[in-house]
Image (cartoon, rainbow, N blue to C red):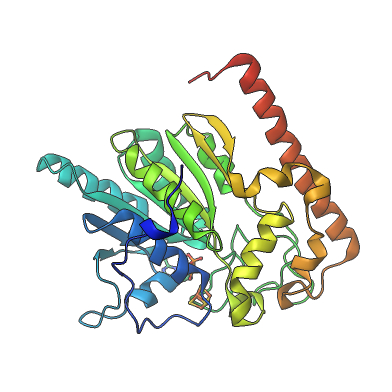
Amino acid sequence: MGIKLNEIPLKEYVLPGTRLCSGCGLQLAYRMALKALGDRTIVTIPASCSTVMHGMQGFSAVNISVLHTTFETTAASASGIAASLKARGIEDVNVVAWAGDGGTADIGIQGLSGAAERQDDFIYVCYDNESYMNTGTQRSGATPKGAMTTTTPVAGKTQWKKDVVKIMEAHQLSYIATANASYPQDLMDKIQKAKEFRGQGVRYIHIFSPCPPGWGYKTEETIEMGRLANQTGLWPLFEKIHGKLSISPASARYMQKENRRDLREYLGKQERFSQIKEEQIVAWEKHIDYTWKKMELELTMQEELGSYV
Ligand SMILES: Cc1ncc(C[n+]2csc(CCOP(=O)(O)OP(=O)(O)O)c2C)c(N)n1
Ligand code: SF4
């Protein structure tokens, strides 16, 4: 049973006066994540919109211990913090690496992969706004095919989105989950769950995080954008505990294709997809069908064979 509305802690860690854009999905996700993490938390963040959110020294808008680190070193710094806490016998502090998709899918991936393989003990969260937003919307490995960015300005990105969750699955982690800024209770449940796996290596959560200026939609549509990503089947919410897949309740009905909303509803609301061609949309729909079919097969195999971990 997940967290109920009246159980959400009232304490705020993200205080009024951050320098983020209005309607920022990252801010919402971080606010709810910190509520789930609580006081005994150290966060490490690389250069990103998150740096801007925390503010300059002496003027932080976030009420938590934060290490600002370089772009490549999010996971490595979390490994270091976790090791130093262990050396001092401190066992009740959550160590959290919190990075954007650029900082995760591209520039920080070797540090993350190394830490995951060594089973260093921290939670790694990637909030995915699908571009390098802080520096003006350059394409990242996680930018979807067809999306226009300042470095793919005419016809949009020509490569598919890098599937970082799959890459992390290949590391056989104790806990992996996808989340979405538009589903805050599900997100909090998953952060809570990741906390429970302390002592069992890197726990990885990948959060879909809409961004009004980077995607080109109205600030008040952030929640709608995240919901559409779920309801079109584009961003399935699931968990993998020691390799065992379970689809989250908010996504379960989208296993059936007939329950999914038309992908065009999602794409049509965002300027970044204004150049996308119909054939690309059709290919993308097939990609979504494949993703769900593979999950369905995996669930069947699990029932037949049980967990192999
Ligand atoms: C080694 C290095 N390269 C480039 C930069 C410039 N830089 C700072 S923030 C940023 C974008 C970060 O993108 P992402 O990780 O996706 O996070 P977001 O800004 O979207 O929150 C870049 C390219 C840097 N600080 N360090
Ligand atoms: S650019 Fe996007 S991710 Fe960055 S602060 Fe603005 S809304 Fe948030």
Which one is nearer the viewer's eye here, 158 or 225? 225
Position of residue 229 in the picture relative to residue 267 (left or right): left
Position of residue 88 in the picture relative to residue 241 (left or right): left
Count the labels in the image: 0
Q: Quadrant of residue 149?
A: bottom right
Which residue is farthest front? 6
Q: Residue at x 36, y 47 (%)?
A: 123
Q: Residue at x 57, y 35 (%)?
A: 246
Which residue is farthest right? 279
Q: Quadrant of residue 229?
A: bottom right
Residue 187 spot, x, y in % from top left = 47, 54
Q: Residue at x 60, y 80 (%)?
A: 220
Residue 24 spot, x, y in % from top left = 51, 75
Position of residue 202 in the picture relative to residue 199 (left or right): right
Residue 203 higher or lower than 283, as above or below? above
Which one is nearer the viewer's eye here, 162 or 232? 232
Is residue 209 in view? yes
Which residue is farthest top? 305
Residue 10 spot, x, y in % from top left = 31, 66
Which one is nearer the viewer's eye here, 167 or 178? 178
Q: Residue at x 72, y 68 (%)?
A: 147
Residue 309 spot, x, y in % from top left = 48, 21
Residue 90 higher or lower than 232, as above or below? above
Is residue 73 in view? no
Which one is nearer the viewer's eye here, 229 or 2? 2
